[in-house]
Amino acid sequence: MPYTAEPWRIKVVEPIRIPTREERERAILTAGYNVSLLRSDEVYIDLYTDSGTNAMSDRQWAGMMIGDEAYAGSSSFYRLEAAVQRYYGYPHVIPVHQGRGAENILSRCLVRPGSHIPGNMYFTTTRAHQELNGGSFHDVIVSRAHDPSSEHPFKGDVDLDALERLIHKVGADTIPYVSVAATVNMAGGQPISMANLTALRELTAQHRIPVILDAARAVENAWFIQQHEPDWGEHSVAEILWQMCALTDGACMSAKKDSYANIGGWLAVRDPGLAEQARNLVVVYEGLHTYGGMAGRDMEAVARGIEESVQEDNIRARIQQVAYLGERLIQAGVPVVRPIGGHAVCLDAAAIMPAVPRDQFPAQTLAAALYLDSGTRGAERGVVSAGRDPVTGENRHPRLELVRLAIPRRVYTRSHLDVVADSVIRTAQHCQAVTTGLSFTHEPATLRFFQARFAPV
Ligand code: F0G
């Protein structure tokens, strides 16, 4: 598809500067070789995440001005609720401060000690809440999702045979729900197909197991279905999004992704009993059920962001920009996860630094090297992010050892991405010869990747 220009122009700019090589050396040392601990003014191009880092539109900013800050019954909540109902189709909407707020409430409602939660690859916060409530996560994604070179267009699909085997092994009554991400973040932003979601729905219905969607990037997933799945090319992204949600019983949403908001989220469900249970918890953990930890202006920004997110030209420009960076790296022979996903280009650190042992964290090492080269910040998505197995205490070894370069929406230009591509190409060449990585000097107990510190081995 030809590269078309962005469907927006720039009205406000935010100055950024390139830290000098000496500043970068000092900064990464102070940060314990963990780019998560860098201060943002030490970063030039920040691809740490696409979450909450998006540029809002003038209409979203205008909405901020008329946000209704009433403690109870904010009219901004009702606009948010109407937008969720219209585009995602769930009747009951519970606002939360961000995605993990929804995960907390949902897990507290449904997960019990001994519960089993199957899903198409784990996400860090999602699994953490399941485990904190005594459940265990089971990865039932198709095996090609673990192969960075597989070009299959729907690497987010669920392996239905594996799921069925799990149901027979542990019993349907121990599975409170199946957790389905669209797209799959940890696999590199890979989508699930409508055909697979439909088949999943049929299988789970036989066993009366609900399906909960992680909708953070479901609009991006809908775009891939429109582009690559037979029968869906003539449907709008909005229609496809609706249909995806129609195959599920509820969703956890981080509005910091698809919805272009800096903060916010929601939990939405079809079952009125579950909605009542969730509303009872939201007042304890987040805020009243008509604001859930968001200011009225945030809810207004999310409501407007939802409407913008499903516009075809917006979503096309978003995915094409990510693809542009990916294609430049592929042409230069840099190993990346293929096909290029919706929100990020993921560098295959294990292939780029083949001599560095997994327990010396190749991806963590590569992320630090990339920062040193150009001030570009990516994020580790490998052994460090995967954490330790709660039973054995050993490092988990996911098959993917990635540095994720997540692209914030509507923020950087193509020239920025050229700077990133040049830097990645240089760094990857340099890293081929590296044989040692990093070891922990400080390791937090939960979600260790955010605050861990390291030293060179
Ligand atoms: N689910 C997915 C698939 C996510 O990517 C995230 C966040 C969450 C849930 C949690 O949402 O941050 O609003 O609490 N992902 C960010 C990232 C942090 O960088 O990928 P949250």
Image: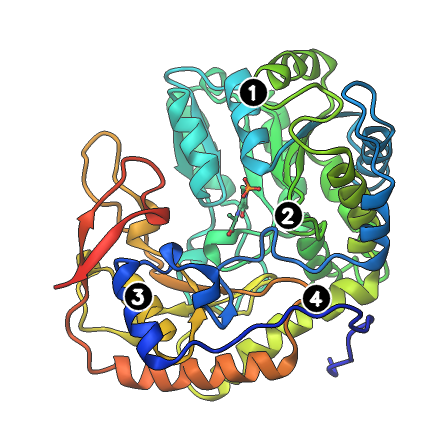
According to the picture, the residue beneath numbered tag 4 turns out to be: 410
According to the picture, the residue beneath numbered tag 2 turns out to be: 256
Q: Is the residue 169 above or below the residue 455 in the image?
A: above
Can you tell me whether the CB of the residue at mark 3 lies under 8 Å from the nearest atom of ligand 1?
A: no
Tag 3: residue type?
Ile
Q: Secondary structure at mark 4?
A: loop
Q: Are marks 4 and 3 in contact (CB under 8 Å)?
A: no
**Residue 138 in sight from this viewpoint:** yes
Q: What's the distance in space between the residues labelled 2 and 4, CA to CA?
A: 13 Å
The disc at residue 28 is 3
Q: Earlier in the sequence, mark 2 or mark 4?
A: 2
Tag 4: residue type?
Arg
**Crowding near the residue tagged with mark 1, few <14, some 14–19, many ≥20 C-alpha atoms within 10 Å:** some
Can you tell me whether the CB of the residue at mark 2 lies under 8 Å from the nearest atom of ligand 1?
A: yes
Quadrant including the C terminus: bottom left
> Which residue is pictured at 15% across the width and 74% down the height?
435
Residue 69 rendering spot, x and y as whole percentages: 79, 29
Q: Earlier in the sequence, mark 4 or mark 1?
A: 1
According to the picture, the residue beneath numbered tag 1 turns out to be: 285
**Crowding near the residue tagged with mark 2, few <14, some 14–19, many ≥20 C-alpha atoms within 10 Å:** many
- In the picture, measured across the screen, residue 383 lies left or right of residue 440, that is right
Q: Are marks 2 and 1 in contact (CB under 8 Å)?
A: no
Q: Earlier in the sequence, mark 4 or mark 3?
A: 3
Q: Secondary structure at mark 3?
A: helix
Q: What's the distance in space between the residues labelled 4 and 1, CA to CA?
A: 32 Å
Tag 2: residue type?
Lys
